[in-house]
Image (tube, coloured by chain):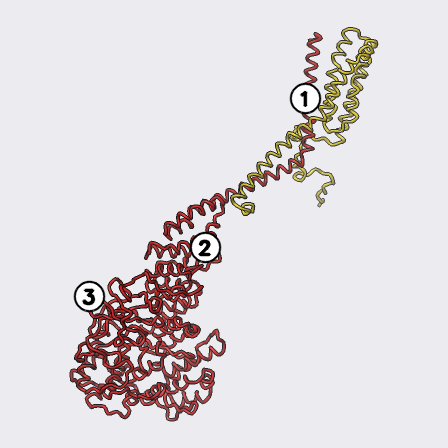
Chain colours: A yellow, B red
Amino acid sequence: MARPPVPRVGTVKSGLGAQKKATPADADGERPKTPGVAKNSKNATLVLAIVAMLVLALFERPVCLLLVLALVPTMLAWLIDDTPGQSLIRTVASLNLASSLPFAIKLWHEHNSLDQVFVFMSSEATWVALYGAAVFGWMLYYLAPALISAVVQRRIERLRETAIERQKALKDEWGDEVAQ
Amino acid sequence: MSVQPQANPSMSAAAGAGVRLKDRFDIQYDKPLPGLRSPSAPAFVAEDIRAPGGRYFALICDPKMPPRIDAIRKLRRLRSVGVLTPVEVGAVDWAPANRRMFAVVCEQPLGDRLAGPADNAIDPWGEEALVAHIVAPIVHTLLDLEREALSHRSIRPGNIFFRDASRRVAMLGDCFTAPPGLHQSVVYETIEGALAQSHTRGAGSTAQDLYALGVLVLHLLSGRLPCAGQTEEKVVEDKIKRGSFYALVSEQRVPTGLSELLRGLLVDEPQARWRLGDIQMWLDGRRITTKQAPPTIRAPRGFVVEGESCETARHLALVLDMQQPEAAGRILRSQDFETWITRTLGDKQVVEAINTAFSTRSESAAGASGQNAQLVSRVLMALDPQAPIRYRDAATAVDGLGALLAVTMLNGGDLMLPSEILSARLPQFWCLRQGSGKGEDQATIRFFDKMLRFQDDKRPGYGIERVAYEMMPGLHCLSPFIEGRYVDEMKDMLPAIEFAVQAKTIDVSPVDRHIAAFIAVHETEIDDGLLYTLIHADPATRVIGTLQLLAFLQESYGPPMVPSLIQLFGLQAKPVIERFKSRYTRTRLQAGLAEILKENSLRKLADYLDSADEQRKDAQRFQRARLEFQQMAKQLEKADQQMEDLNSTAKLAGHSVAVKIASLISSAIVAVTLFAMGVL
C-alpha cells in the first residue's frame, strides 16, 4: 500500500496562519504590503513615469521639459519614500502635478516652445508656484501625523483621567477591597 | 473585671431599715428573730403591708447554698398547716450583705420550737404525749407531702415547731432554705444519707423522712441524741455493722409500745421500712405485719483491710472508701479480693456487678489515676448499691449531683470532680446497679446521658454551666457579673446586666457562659445559632449576636430602659458599622447612631445595626462597584495600549490624511485651472 504523501514544507495549511493579526494599516483601509511588493509597486510607478515622459518627449518636448523641471520634488519624494503605500509620493506628486498643470496648459496653448519653457523658468513666481505646492505636500506629509497624534493623545488622556478619577472615587467609597 | 457590691439601694426600699418583697412584705433587717432562724438562714420580722397585724417572718437564704425551689413551689401549692409554708419568695436587696439575697416569707408558728437548734439535751417525752403531739401530726403532714411527691429531709428536734402555744400539735419547720438534709446530723440520716456529703444527700423520698422520724422518737424518749459523743464515722460504721436499730438504741430502754414502731422505721433496707400507711395503721392500733428484709449476706471469714475485718460487702465498701484510691485500687486488683468475693462472700449479684465494674471501659482526662478512681467508684457501687456515688473526695446521692455542682460553683471549688463523675457515667452505673428495671431508672439514665452531652458541648449555652442549671432548676445565675444580683428568673436578667454595666463590672461582653447557659435553660425560644454567635471569631458578629439576644430579653421581659447597656453597645458598634463596605453607608449609620441610642431600645438598635435590607443593598452596590472598577481598569489598559501604539497609528493615519488632503487640494487646483483657462 502506498504511503500517504507527506506535506511539503511551505504547504498552506488551514487554521494556523489563516487568522491574521489586525494591524493599524487595516484600520485605514490600506492593504499591508511587504517591502518587496512596495518596491515593485514603486518601480512600476517609475517605469510608468519614464514611459509617459518618453512618449511626451516624442510629441511635446517643451511640456516634457517643463514637467521634468517641475517634478523634481516628486522625484526626490520617490527617492526618499519607503512607506508601504507610497504616501509621500502620492501627497507630493498630486500637488506637484496640479501646480504644474497651469504652466503646461499655458505652454501648450500659447507658445509651445523650449524658449517659452525657459521664460517660465526664469520667473521666480513659477518656481514659487511649482515648488511651493510641493513643499506644502512635504509639510502636509510630515505635520499630519504629528497633528493627529496630538489630537488622539489628548483624547486618550481624557479617557485615562476619567477612568482614574472613577477608580479613585470607587476606592474612596468602598476601600481597597473594591479593587480585588 | 472587678466585682462590685451588687445591692441597689434605690430598688425595693422599704421604710426604715428594711426592704420590700414583691410590693407586699417589708422585711426589717434590724429586727432579727433568732428563735425562728434556720441554720443557714437567719430570720427577720416581715410585715404584710396589705394586711398589717399578721405574724410573718422572713428567712434570708445563704447565697452559697441553693434553696429547694421545687420544694417551695410544692409547699405553696400544698398549703399544709403541718409544715412551715412559704407565703412569698423572691430576691431582695439585702443591704447588710451588700447584695441581693433570696428571701422566703412564712407565717410565724404560734408555738415555739421543740428544741433549740443545737439539738442538745431535751426534756424526755412520755410515750403517749410523744405519739399524740409529735408522731401523729408529723405523719399527717408527711402524708400531705407525699401527695406532692415531696420529702422534707429536715426532721429533727431543732426544726420542729408547735402549731399552738400549748405545744400540743407539732409542725415541721423549714425544709427549703438549703439543699435536702444539709443540716441533718448523721444520726438522723439513713446509712445512704450519712455516707453522702451533707449538701449532696439528695431529696430522696418519704422513706428517709420516716427513718428520721424513728430517730426523732428515740431522741425524744431519752432526751438526748442517740449515739451522742460518738464521731460521725463511728456512728455510720456502727449502723452498717449492727444495723441502725441496734446501733441507735444501743443500751437505751425502749418502751414496748414504741418498739414495734422504731423497729419498723429504723430498718436499713428502704423496701422493708414502714411506710406512712403502716404507721397510720399502727396509730390506729392495728397490728402491722412485719416485712422481712432480705438478709444481709455475711462472709464466714472477714476480708481484712488495714486491720479492719469486713464481713459484709457494704462494710467492705465503707472501709475501701476510706482508703486512698491508689491503695483501694491495688486491693481490688489483688487475688485475695477476688477469692474473697467469689468464694468466701459468695454473693452472685455482687460478683456480677464487680465483673461489670471491671469490664466497664474507663476513660479519664486524669489518666491512669482517674481510671483507677473510676474503677474504685464502680466497685464501691457494686459492693454497696444503695450507697451514694463515691468518687475521690466526693460522695453524692444520684439526685444530689446537681447540688454538688451548684455548691462547688457557688463556693469556687474544683469543678473537675463533678465533671469527672458525669464523664465517667457513674450516675448511669449507679442506676443500673439498682437493678429495679423501673422506668424511673431508665429516665434517670437518659437524663444523665443528656447532661453528659451538654457537658461535652463547649459552645455557649452548654458545658458544665448548662448542666448545673438543668440539674438545679431553681439555681440563680452564677455569672460573676451578676451573681450578687441573685437572678433566678428571666425577668431579672436584663436589669441585673444593666446594673453590672452601670457599676462597670461589665465593660466588654455582657453575656458570659453562665448567662448564656441560664438563658438556654430558661428560654426555649432562643435559637442555638444565636448563642453560637457569642463566640464567633468576627467581633462584629459577636456584638450583633449579644445585642440580638439581649434585645429579645428586653422585648420579652423588659425593662424598657437600659441606658448603660445601650451606651455599651454604642461603644461597641464600630466593628458592626465597619461591616458595611460603603464608606457613605458607614458614615450615615454612625451619624444616625446617636439618635437610635437615645431611644433606649435594644431591638431598635439591633435592627438599625443589623438591617438585612441595608446589608443586602450594600452587598449589591459593592458588587456593582467592583464590576465598574474592573471596567475602568480595562479602560486604562486599553488607553495604555493605545498610547503605546500612538506613534505608529498616528503616522499611518496622518499619512493617509495627508494623501487625501493633497488629493483634494490637487483636484481643486486642477478644476480651477481648467475652468480659468477655458479648457472646460
Above or below residue B679? Residue A177 is below
**Amino acid on which the number 2 mark rests in the picture:** Thr
Which chain letter goes with mark 1? Answer: B
* Residue B543: % across, % down: 44, 55
| Quarter of image, res B416 | bottom left
Q: Which residue is mark 2?
A: B541
Label pair 1/3, CB-CB below 8 angstroms: no
| Quarter of image, res A167 | top right
Q: Looking at the image, which is closer to me, A34 or B47?
A: B47
Label pair 2/1, CB-CB below 8 angstroms: no
* Spatial CA span between label 2 and label 1: 70 Å
Above or below residue B609? Residue B670 is above
Is any part of residue A56 visible from this angle? no
Q: Looking at the image, which is closer to me, A113 or B376?
A: B376
Q: Which residue is mark 3?
A: B52
The residue at 40%/54% (across/down) is: B566
Of badges 2 and 3, nearer the viewer stands: 3
Q: Which residue is mark 1?
A: B661
| Quarter of image, res A43 | top right
Q: Share a chain, discs 2 and 3?
A: yes
Q: Share a chain, discs 2 and 1?
A: yes
**Amino acid on which the number 3 mark rests in the picture:** Pro
Within 10 Å of disc 1 (Cα), the crowding (few <14, some 14-19, many 20+) is: some
Within 10 Å of disc 3 (Cα), the crowding (few <14, some 14-19, many 20+) is: few
**Amino acid on which the number 1 mark rests in the picture:** Ile
Nearer-N-terminus badge (2/3): 3
The residue at 31%/71% (across/down) is: B61
* Residue B593: % across, % down: 42, 48
* Residue B166: % across, % down: 16, 80
| The N terminus of chain B: image quadrant | bottom left
